[in-house]
Amino acid sequence: QVQLVESGGDLVQPGGSLRLSCTASGSIFSILGMGWYRQAPGKQRELVAISNGASTAYTDSVKGRFTISRDNAKNTLYLSMNSLKPEDTAAYYCNAVVVTTARVQLSTWGQGTQVTVSS
């Protein structure tokens, strides 16, 4: 079917930067939208940023610090994170809403990549 593979998570000091990547592969006809979510221990998964065509949106806590971007030719989504704070510590998950080559629409999740912000 469709697979998402994330990478880029790491341990970083407060104020540091990271860039996450998420590459979609498999039976993809088109990608309708992609987004980044995160889940901290003991908390619900929350939306961080989404990219639908030419539009993007961010949760308030990351506005001005995070930038979401896509390379459509590579079916890859990025999240550039600057001025990282300890409260950004979480497992980050990529989500994609795709239309498969069988013309079926589905939502797919990656396995997650850990971001830890600590001195």
Image (tube, helix red, strand yellow):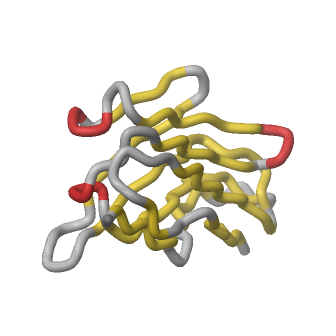
Residue 93, position as x, y percentages in the image: 46, 65
Which quarter of the figure is the C terminus placed in? bottom left
Name which residue lies at 28% across and 50% down.
85
For this orientation, the residue located farthest to the top is 54
* Quarter assignment of residue 83: top left
Name which residue lies at 53% across and 77% down.
111
As drawn, 38 above or below 33? below
Name which residue lies at 64% across and 47% down.
77
Residue 103, position as x, y percentages in the image: 71, 55
For this orientation, the residue located farthest to the front is 119
Q: Is residue 119 left or right of residue 8?
A: left
As drawn, 81 above or below 115? above
Between 54 and 5, the one nearer to me in the picture: 5
As drawn, 56 above or below 112? above
* Quarter assignment of residue 100: bottom right
Residue 12, position as x, y percentages in the image: 45, 61
Which quarter of the figure is the N terminus placed in? bottom right
Between 52 and 101, the one nearer to me in the picture: 52
Residue 107, position as x, y percentages in the image: 51, 61
